[in-house]
Image (cartoon, rainbow, N blue to C red):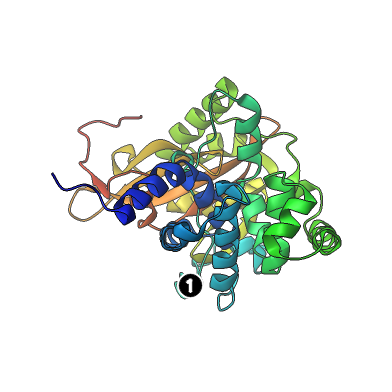
Amino acid sequence: MRQPSATTQSGEDFARLADPYRPELLAYCYRMLGSVHDAEDLVQEILLRAWQAYGGFEGRASLRTWLYRIATNTCLRALENRVRRPLPSGLSGPAEDPDAPASTAMSEVPWLQPIPETLYGANPADPASVVASRAGMRLALIAALQYLPPRQRAVLILRDVLRWQAPEVARLLGVSAAAVNSLLQRARAQLGHAALSEDDIAEPTDPQVRGLLDRYAAAFQTADVAALMRLLTADAVYEMPPIPIWFAGRRTVGRFLEPRLPESPADIRVVPASANGQPALATYRRGRDGMLHAHSIQVLTIEASLIARVTSFQDPALFATFGLPDALPTPHEPTMD
């Protein structure tokens, strides 16, 4: 019987040791890039680079630290020629007239994307790590990170999200601890405290949150705008990338949605989901062929038991990432999952 070669054995060793770090590397790259699709591609590149260099890995640092060094350098190179990924609310002020014709989608803008929790989820046996993971993946934080220079972005993620010590980050970046602290101070000053706070983080599995989500889904599916408005905060925000406009204020959001929701519950299907550690909904709408087609992934921000923000990603290509089909058969009667 042919014995495995040293190269094959080394590759098998690398895969066994490195695979457990894949979810956290994906989360790190997503925080850096703001795109789940780009992050998945980059993790493949990172692991390939690491595998090719594994024969020279001397173990002076842990394998995790070594992988993060490769990941950081790969992300920084990837960001050299890329523009930031915004949300509509990061580009302009809110639209004033909800009755005006909807703006045309801006497909040329590389918009921020959501990420399903199933791709990066923390250890459920460690509640503290779950809360920290969700705080570090919130959509508001990912959007704010996009406005930091890449090295500041990396330092803030490593120090304030992943809780690395300054000397560790300094060794990883090949700079002094003083330089790391300077980069961190500038990043914190630009982001502010709110983006990193773990206060008022709504757990997607909390019974009150689930109840709120169920009521929102029911009101959305039945086009009950009055019920929807009762679930929103007074200053609620509604945005719909790749459509560049967005709306602020419960009444304005209600006026915008009222003529745009399907009249028949049979024309829409709402499926619960989870994205960025926040409750989410996937919506399907009936097409001319009678099927219900993927329409949007809505990520909800909950504050004080009400919905403060709805970011409705109108990108059917995201559904595969969330493990959802592109289309569903039209039910004989309205159903809810």
Q: Picture coordinates of residue 164 (x, y %)? A: 72, 46
| Residue 242 placement (x, y as % from top left) | 48, 65
Residue occupying the point 50% across, 44% down:
21
**Type of amino acid under label 1:** Met
Look at 76% across and 65% down and name the residue there.
175
Q: Is residue 222 visible in the rendered structure shown here?
A: no
Residue at 55% of width from left, 61% of height from top? 70
Which residue is located at x 58 percent, y 54 percent? 66
Q: In the picture provided, is 253 more to the left or to the right than 316?
A: right
> In the image, is 321 to the left or to the right of 86?
left
Question: Measured along the vertical axis of the image, is residue 282 above or below residue 333?
Answer: below
* SS for callout 1: loop
Q: Is residue 219 above or below residue 87?
A: above
In the rendered structure, the answer to whether residue 319 lies left or right of residue 291 reads right
Question: Which quadrant does the C terminus fall into?
Answer: top left
Residue ID for mark 1: 106
Marker count (numbered):
1
Q: Nearer the viewer, residue 104 or 152?
A: 152
